[in-house]
Image (cartoon, helix red, strand yellow):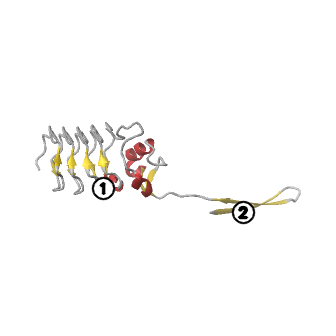
Amino acid sequence: NINITATITTGSGNKFDIKTVYTITTQTFLFTRNDNAEVVEKMYAAGKCASPYGMTQAECEAVTSLLNSSGNSIFFRDSNLKTFNELQYFTKLTSLPYCCFAACTSLTSITIPNSVTSLGEYCFQNCTSLTSITIPNSVTSLGNSCFASCTSLTSITIPNSVTTLGGSCFYGCTSLTS
């Protein structure tokens, strides 16, 4: 609380004491617009965070889906998304759905949280700037065409936990070497 007290004296000598108490609530953001403006803007627009300036730890931990209220991926065809390493803070997220990051042509890096168990169909399809990705040990399935047409993808680490590999998962990954 901030207390402001002032005494006002009128020209006729009357004195008035004024006391005002302000309560200022501050938010501690886990990441802000300065860290990743594109992610904050999209999450705010989808109603996943209360402030257009950042996301708190509680907000990140409350995210269970990367779909908007219409059921569409928040980041589908987002050519402005360059990195999304803040995704690691979304610890209640268990899957990256159909077309989750498809056609995010500027996406170069992303950190998938350990809570994710499946990458949906076309999840990263046509992410033409993605060069490498590490899939956490929690993931058990990669959907059809999950990484199709990721033409800059040179390496991917697939853990032993992956037991289902969808058809055409790496179709068109012309730079993949390991």
Where residue 19 appears, x then y in whole percent?
A: 73, 61
Where residue 102 appears, x then y in whole percent?
A: 27, 39
* Within-10-Å neighbours for mark 2: few <14, some 14–19, many 20+: few
The amino acid type of the residue labelled 1 equals: Ser
- Indicate whether 161 appears above or below 77: below
State how far apart marks 1 and 2 are (Cα): 51 Å
Where residue 27 appears, x then y in whole percent?
A: 50, 57
Residue at mark 2 = 5
Where residue 75 appears, x then y in whole percent?
A: 34, 41
* Comes first in the chain, label 1 or label 2: 2
Q: Secondary structure at mark 2?
A: strand
Could you say which disc has been placed on residue 34 in the image? Answer: none
Q: Residue furthest left?
A: 177
Q: Residue furthest right?
A: 12
Would you say 178 lies left or right of 71 here?
left
Q: Residue furthest front?
A: 163
Tag in front: 1 or 2: 1
Taking depth in this image into account, of 131 and 139 the one nearest to the observer is: 139
In the image, what residue occupies the spot 15% across and 42% down?
A: 170
Would you say 12 lies left or right of 39 here?
right
In the image, what residue occupies the spot 24% across and 56% down?
A: 138
Residue at mark 1 = 115
Q: Secondary structure at mark 1?
A: loop
In the image, what residue occupies the spot 21% across and 43% down?
A: 143
The amino acid type of the residue labelled 2 equals: Thr
Would you say 80 lies left or right of 139 here?
right
Number of numbered labels in the structure image: 2
* Within-10-Å neighbours for mark 1: few <14, some 14–19, many 20+: some
